[in-house]
Image (cartoon, rainbow, N blue to C red):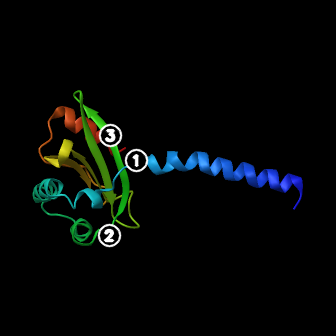
Amino acid sequence: MTHHAKVLIRLVSATALLLAPARSGAQTAPYLTEVLKKPAYRTAWTQLLASSKPTPSWLTTFTKTSNGVETPSTPVTVAGQTYEAYSVCKPHDCSDNRLEVIYAPGGQQAWGILIVNAGKPRYLGSPDAAMTSALNQIQK
């Protein structure tokens, strides 16, 4: 092995060792399917969908099977309070069929904006003006 190859191997190994603690300690944002395993989130989800009658079949399927396209949660600030925003959409049809959900801390309450067949947005969970504005922002 050449001197250059040995130096390169050492450099790559040292870089990997330096980066390993940073990666292992990094928190990854949860997905909706993960938080729906928690009772508070599931209860708020069930109440949210109850306000969306008729519920689209793809959303009913997602609730039962987790079959949907999701993005990790992102923090959203509404009226000075930090909330959790999640997104799920119909597989192979995300642009026309999607649900954006904002959860209160700990999953105690949820609000959503539902787009079905590229139609007019439906607001779920009776959002106030500030929450409606936040939902409009995240669904863009």
Residue 27 shows which numbered tag? Answer: 1
Residue drawn at the location 39% of the way across and 56% of the way down:
95
Res 104 visible? no
- Mark 1, Cα crowd under 10 Å, few <14 / some 14-19 / many 20+, is few
Image point 28% across, 61% down: which residue?
A: 33
Disc 2 residue type?
A: Asn
x, y percent for residue 93: 38, 64
Q: CA distance from mark 3 to mark 1?
A: 14 Å
What residue type is disc 3 on? Pro
Q: Hey, what amino acid is under mark 1?
A: Gln
Residue 52, horizontal then vertical, whole percent: 14, 57
Residue at 37% x, 49% y: name it: 29
Q: Earlier in the sequence, mark 1 or mark 2?
A: 1
Provide the residue designation for mark 3. Answer: 75
Q: Which quadrant of the figure has residue 47?
A: bottom left
Name the mark on residue 67: 2
Q: Earlier in the sequence, mark 3 or mark 2?
A: 2
**How many C-alpha atoms fall within 10 Å of the one at disc 3: few (<14), some, or many (≥20)?**
some
Residue 83: give x, y in percent of width and height: 25, 39
Q: Quadrant of residue 2?
A: bottom right
Q: Cα distance, mark 3 to mark 2?
A: 24 Å
User: Residue shown at 81%/55% (left/top)?
Assistant: 6
The CA span between labels 1 and 2 is 24 Å
